[in-house]
Amino acid sequence: MLKKSFWFVALLLSVAINAQDYFPKNNGVHTKNSNYTAFTNAKIYVTPTEIIKNGTLLIKDGKVVNSGTSVNIPKNAVVVDLEGKSIYPSFIDLYSTFGIKQPQSSGTRSRSTEYEPSRTGYYWNDHIMPEQEAISALAYSENAATDLLEAGFGVVNTHVHDGIVRGTGTLIALNNSKGNEHRILEEHSAQYLSLSRSVKTKQSYPNSIMGSMALLRQLYIDADWYAKGNIDTKDLSLEALNKNKSLIQIFDAGSRANILRADKVGDAYGIQYIMFGGGDEYERINEIKATNAKIILPLDFPDAFDVEDPFTTASLSLEDMRAWNQKPHNPKILAENNIEFAFTTHKLKSAKELKGKILKAIEAGLSKEKALAALTTVPAKLINKESEIGSLKNGSLANFLISSGDIFDKETTLYENWVQGDKTVIEVLDKKDIKGDYTFSIANQDYKMSISGELSKPKTKITSNGKTLDSKITYNKNWVSISMATIDSIKNEFIRIIANPGTNGLTGKSISPNGTENSFVASLSPSEDTSDKKKKDKDKDKDDNKSNTLYPVSYPNKAFGFKTLPETETLLFKNATVWTSEAEGILENTDVLIKDGKIIKIGKDLSAGRAKAIDATGKHLTAGIIDEHSHIATASVNEGGQNSSAEVTIEDVIDETDTNIYRNLAGGVTSIQILHGSANPIGGRSAIIKLKWGESADNLVYTNTPKFIKFALGENVKQSNWGSFNRFPQTRMGVEQVYIDYFTRAKAYDALKKSGKPYKKDIELDVLAEILNKERFISCHSYVQSEINMLMKVAEKFNFNINTFTHILEGYKVADKMKEHGVGGSTFSDWWAYKYEVNDAIPYNASIMHNAGVTVAINSDNAEMSRRLNQEAGKTVKYGGMSEEEAWKFVTINPAKLLHIDDRVGSIKVGKDADLVLWSNHPLSIYAKAEKTIIEGKTYFDIEKDKQLQAEVTKERSELINLMLQSKSKGNKTQPIKKKTKTLLHCDSMDNELAEAHSH
């Protein structure tokens, strides 16, 4: 019995041993090294903050056994003396494409866009691919791994960079000695997401950032509904998404604006994303910190621009010039604000650029401790692998670097990179450092030589009698080979030198062009006098500090941004001509007192008290202009991927940095409605904002903002002339049917929702149900009277009213019906004939609608026109005989009424927001200038301050140009100035493929 038990145990042991190594070894002899290796007398960075001087690192079986100053070294250990050298943990990159062939575009998208998914059994949208696995696409590349190893990396987290939900990543050890069974540290390490479409599919939706955000929101709702067993149909994408919920979620934001956008989506569904950043987080550091997101940080600091040509330099924006100066400071600013970040090589042309970029960040103030943490302990922590990688603590993988010294010193040599206890040699460990300055003589001719660069690829500069000679150098196995031109360059002859490095220089032989050999000695130049060296270092530091000085961040961070945001003031305007836009009309020589952001008194001879008095004698004070129809200050205007985009919202894509905000303030505009475009019959939800230049995107939006949505009629939405032949609708009749179909569905959805029965939330139908319930208002893009009549009838069929017809250039034909329906008209003053369906437009349109009893506003739909809406309103005095007072209401109280914000803005009335404009002249005059534009008691535009800002911009541009010229003179890389064109978005602007298919 005992004997049988012995053989049974032996069999189990045999199976267990064989099971650990089941891959066949068909190439050469296979041996397994189980010995200890001890690295002694080194400076060991166990972590960025735990450093052992003159210590020993003991490893075995690919792991760290011990480290310290008194480590017991086993007898069978291989001992490597690293006296004078340093050991660091190998680096980790969490945002890699290593080993994965990235998908390529399926070709130029035709105008006949695809609207349906191409897959069966997966989510309805092809851009959602949580089932995608990096492990399935991984093809380990030793060459690519070697490039990363030579840059100091030991582990990468790789994934497929394609799609909105990209599937899972895989954590890989860069071990060229072992097979994949050892390299894979985690098959499914994280789930990756983005706001970018997949290049593999032609499915049209989404084609905007706001569409991507809406899709993600609906996806999470659908996944939750599916997880609860409410859907009978099998959906492999939703199953994968639910399975991946427990993984780290890494979001490719790519900019500080998109970090804030993505965080909104995550917060709504209880998800804390790790964000791949854009390097511009410093611009809104407080908002970034408030997200609680950890950042994976690219280091693609821009090169200086080539600014030698003053003509091309004139087109270079201050924003781009600042980015060159400010972006290297971003890591330091993140560190100062206690925001955890990890570095990545993503966006660098090569991993070899990493060290230079980190040195630049260190020069800009980042501590070396934080820099090392961003490459080791932080990424390990973010991926939940801190016990295995990122440090040299006992039990962690033996992933470490051996260097000649400080890893962040420009002259430090990286000798070896060990991954899982296997060595990759980058430079021979006992290779002597030959960098330095030398003097030598050959045939009574004196020479000076400087050797610099990496030991594997050294560079040499040889001079004699002030002349630089052509030379080349190689260094291999402690042999230095130099070829240099003779002093007589006419002969085109070369002297060859072969030498060994010694303590004080190089010794060997030189071979003259005629073959004569002579002994050769190159002596290391004596060290500079300490005082001279200190003076040079001080001067260099002075120059470096000047070029590394952080130019102040403004709000927004571009020309005319504020260094500090405006503060609420108590102001008293004295003796103004006050255009109240109320029953009181125009008041002469009147005072207006504002306090705490509100209008508190209107009258004559008001007391200033502690208020700042402003002499408005001879000037005009009005309420701020309100633009009912605008497309400025948005990152995208259209989500045209479907015939209804009710689920998207412009509030997701507000761009608070758009200079058009400042230009509008200079034209007296204080509030606007940012409308979705007209790509589809049912567009997206609006954003109603105040133009608080310098504030964050969220702070621009009205509190308790009225709910609006954009609808559209006409040529744009049917798209029949654009080649979108497989899209419904194709006719104006089809547009009507779209509305009837969607409202019928929304009505049924709303009834189910109100019944108390289980239902799946549908964001799109929720929004449409709000219209049916009179909780959301429609602004509808319109031109032709037949369609205007049609939509009013559709609305009446479903028992609601259209709020505003915008454009409404044939409104004069149906003004009586508009009055009866109760809809307002927001029109142009005199635009006409810019496309066929506008041919019947007349400049009397506004006055005819007004005289019929319709609430009328003049809008811009154009970033240039919005700066002079006061003049557009003035045209109605000429065309239609409007009184000046009524004309002014077209851009103040009337649009406020159309937007349901007239209780707050649009007129000068006690209790309303102090949104005011002080004009130099009659406000309807072309000579009038907005001298002050005030929102809630804060001055956001001041004509005198503007002059000061212009001077500051000129000065800053000049300083930055000089710094760029200095950078180029030092031999640093420069980039050409590229001409930029920014589309002034308006109603007929189409995003992505639609932009090519249609132009205004």
Image (cartoon, rainbow, N blue to C red):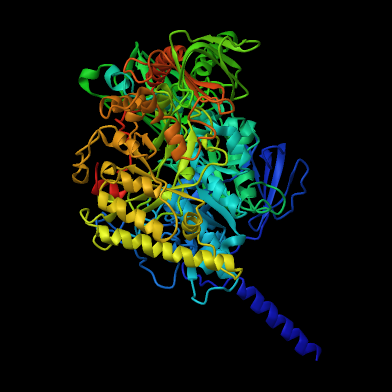
Displayed quadrant of residue 528: top right
Residue 337 placement (x, y as % from top left): 64, 33
Displayed quadrant of residue 650: top left
Q: From the viewer's perspective, tell me whether residue 587 is left or right of residue 824.
A: right
Q: Is residue 799 above or below residue 73?
A: below
Q: From the viewer's perspective, tell me whether residue 115 is left or right of residue 655.
A: left
- Farthest-out residue, right: 2
Displayed quadrant of residue 879: top left
Residue drawn at x 30%, y 47% as measured from the top left: 782
Q: Is residue 995 above or below residue 448?
A: below
Residue 104 placement (x, y as % from top left): 33, 56
Residue 539 placement (x, y as % from top left): 52, 11
Quadrant location of the N terminus? bottom right
**In the foreground, 131 or 734:** 734
Residue 210 can be seen in this image: yes
- Farthest-out residue, bottom: 1
Residue 168 can be seen in this image: no
Quadrant location of the C terminus? top left
Count of numbered marks? 0
Residue 480 placement (x, y as % from top left): 43, 32
